[in-house]
Image: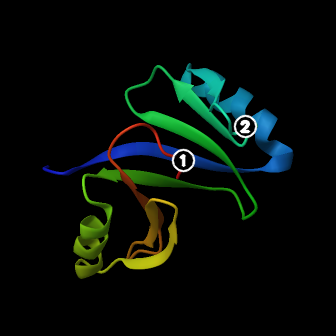
Amino acid sequence: MSGRRLSTLVIDCQAETMDRAVAFWAAALDLEAAPEPGSRGRYWALQGGSIDVLLQQVEWPTSYHIDIEADDVDAEAARLEALGATKKRRVESWWVMRAPTGHDFCIVPRGPAQPG
């Protein structure tokens, strides 16, 4: 698969459950939890697994989504639109997309971990 890869499983958490979510998922997946620098506790990385896991504090109902890392975010968004996905919104350097199945996912730039 050239130019893209499955990057991160993102677990969206409400503010009031974030501490419990970090403790639970770190223990459940046997991974080390560390806050993302500068995020003021909004993002927590679970480290040591075969795939990156990120817990992020959100205002919407809790859910899961994946991040797809791409060399060219806009070209990948266009490719996935041609396959039936739709763009929901642009956030900083990434796209929030919706699959034809109704599942949300993000396309993020290849490189250092990006919140998604």
| Residue found at x 35% / y 40% | 111
Residue 2 image position (x, y, % from top left):
13, 50
Q: Is residue 68 left or right of residue 17?
A: left
Residue 52 image position (x, y, % from top left):
45, 34
Q: Which amino acid lies under the numbered mark 2 shown in the image of this protein? A: Ala
Q: Which residue is mark 1?
A: 115
| Residue found at x 25% / y 52% | 71
Element type at mark 2:
helix
Tell me the quarter of the picture where residue 34 sits: top right
Whichever of callouts 1 and 2 sits on the residue coming sooner in the sequence is 2
Q: Is residue 70 left or right of residue 1?
A: right
Q: Is residue 72 left or right of residue 38?
A: left
Tell me the quarter of the picture where residue 20 sits: top right
- Using the numbered discs, state the Cα–Cα distance from disc 1 to disc 2 in whole angstroms: 17 Å
Neighbour class for label 1 at 10 Å: few (<14), some, many (≥20)?
some
As drawn, which residue projects farthest toward the right? Answer: 16
Figure check: 108 above or below 97: above
Along the line of sight, the residue nearer the viewer: 74 or 62: 74
Number of numbered discs visible in the structure rendering: 2
Neighbour class for label 2 at 10 Å: few (<14), some, many (≥20)?
many
Structure colour scheme: rainbow
| Residue found at x 44% / y 24% | 49
Residue 81's tag is none
Figure check: 84 above or below 37: below
Mark 2 and mark 1 in contact (Cβ < 8 Å)? no
Q: Which residue is mark 2?
A: 21
As drawn, which residue projects farthest toward the left? Answer: 2
Residue 14 image position (x, y, % from top left):
77, 52
Residue 59 image position (x, y, % from top left):
76, 61
Figure check: 24 above or below 95: above
Q: Which amino acid lies under the numbered mark 1 shown in the image of this protein? A: Pro
